[in-house]
Amino acid sequence: MTEYDKALTARATQIAGLLVFEIPVHGDNRGWFKENWQREKMGLAGLPDFGPVQNNISFNDAPGTTRGIHAEPWDKFISVATGRIFGVWVDLRAGSTFGVVVTAILDPSRAVFVPRGVGNAFQTLDPNTVYTYLVNDHWSADAQYASVNLADETLAIDWPIPLDRAELSVKDRAHPRLSELVPFAPRRTLVLGAGGQLGRALHEVYSDAGYVDLAARGQLDLTSSGLDKAFRWRDYDTIINAAAFTAVDAAESAEGRAAAWAANVTGVSTLARLATEHGMTLVHISSDYVFDGTSPRPYREDDSVSPLGVYGQTKAAGDCIVATVPRHYIVRTSWVIGDGRNFVGTMLSLAERGIDPFVVDDQQGRLTFTSELARAIRHLIESRAPFGTYNVTGSGGVCSWADIARRTFALAGHDPDRVTGVSTKEYFAAAATPVAPRPRNSVLCLEKILSVGFEPAPVDRLLAAYVDAKKHALARRKGHA
């Protein structure tokens, strides 16, 4: 018999993410009423906001009708409209709980949330049982499915009605044993802009992960009208967007302005919409250029943006869009150095060629090596840090570009006094093309990223290692010449 007027509660089970809900059912002489799925109340009780897109109903004529055990690539909220079922759930996901079994009797006053990759089965206990479920994706022939035999000996399910007397389909009787099953793969991670400096660092930091897909610029156009169908997005848990228009001076031209807005705003808005629709985490890279550089202290994550130039404007707009995604990390950084053309590499080249550079000395900040940026991104995702904005740079003292140039010369065995410091205005005085205004203060406060357990490495140590690696690479090239 259905139990009336329970309090709405959620109970965790031995299978991670599988929740059993007690649902208030209100009855009188006319029958009963219940809120079968109530987004706000059930969210407060613990139900993920899983975004259902379809409602399915299964009518079962006789007791003993048995269906399953099926795991699909979507989440399900399962309840009973009339009758009772014996529900069975088996974790078919890779991990320590693979093969764990949970059972419960469901009637109109009890429901269950079944996460993606958990096998679901039921056996009806009453005639004319109606079983209903919400799912957050549409059926697709190319999606990954997994099934295990209802009579698997290792699962040892105590069916109320023995399977030899139950009503099963031929297909369900033929499902493989658990020992034959390949565990259900987790949702994947997609790195966009994989050919860039950060993309290459992400490739390296995820080199041990078989669940990461890489898409370089030539493989995916963020501004394409076909982006919606470029991937089966429901298969992805996380998008790391390492693709961006970063030519800050070119963005000041008419052509560059259009390209910057297309990549940094239009493309990002499409990713934000897809991430929201499919329940994905979106990782977005922000910049110190969203600030005007006039703050007397390091910039915090919650400081108001005030960009000076087009590039900064597009990055600030992208930040605002990504902040609307329920699951997002905005990783704000500055003065990025990685595998490719960059400031430190340029200084090393000048030093080796005997050129004494003039370098800006009135902009302050810290370098960020892409290896650290990639490491911080993986830490945020895997530690499940609270969603939001995080500053990430190297740690240590604040310096100017001229200071970094002198340090680079010295580490490479050259006289640091060959570097002459000049003001930004002096440096760009003779520029023939438009120049983007630079923030004078690019120092970012690191307290928040430290609070979630990530400790950025000192810039001095990373710079020394970077220069040493470049010196060895140059020596090898000369040896082969």
Image (tube, rainbow, N blue to C red):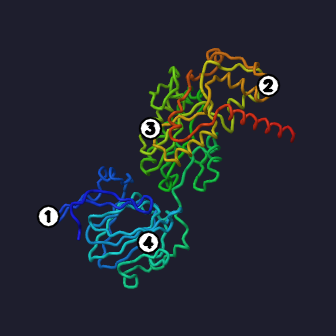
Give the residue furthest to the left. Answer: 29
Look at 31% across and 53% down and name the residue there.
Answer: 42
> Which residue is disc 2 drawn over?
414
Q: Residues within 10 Å of mark 4 (few under 14, many from 20)?
A: many
Q: Residues within 10 Å of mark 2 (few under 14, many from 20)?
A: some
Q: Secondary structure at mark 3?
A: helix
What's the amino acid at mark 2? Answer: His
Q: Kindly identify the amino acid type of the residue bearing the numbered disc 4.
A: Ile
> What is the x, y in percent for residue 288?
54, 29
| Disc 3: which residue | 321
The disc, 3 or 1, on the residue closer to the chain's N-terminal end is 1
Residue occupied by mark 1: 28
- Tell me the element at label 4: strand
* 185 horizontally vs 472: left or right: left
Camera-near label (3 vs 1) is 1
- Crowd around label 1: few <14 · some 14–19 · many ≥20 (10 Å): few
The front one of 461 and 86 is 461
Alpha-carbon span between mark 2 and mark 1? 89 Å
- In terms of secondary structure, where does tag 2 sit? loop
Q: Which residue is mark 4?
A: 69
| Quadrant of residue 362 within the rendered picture | top right
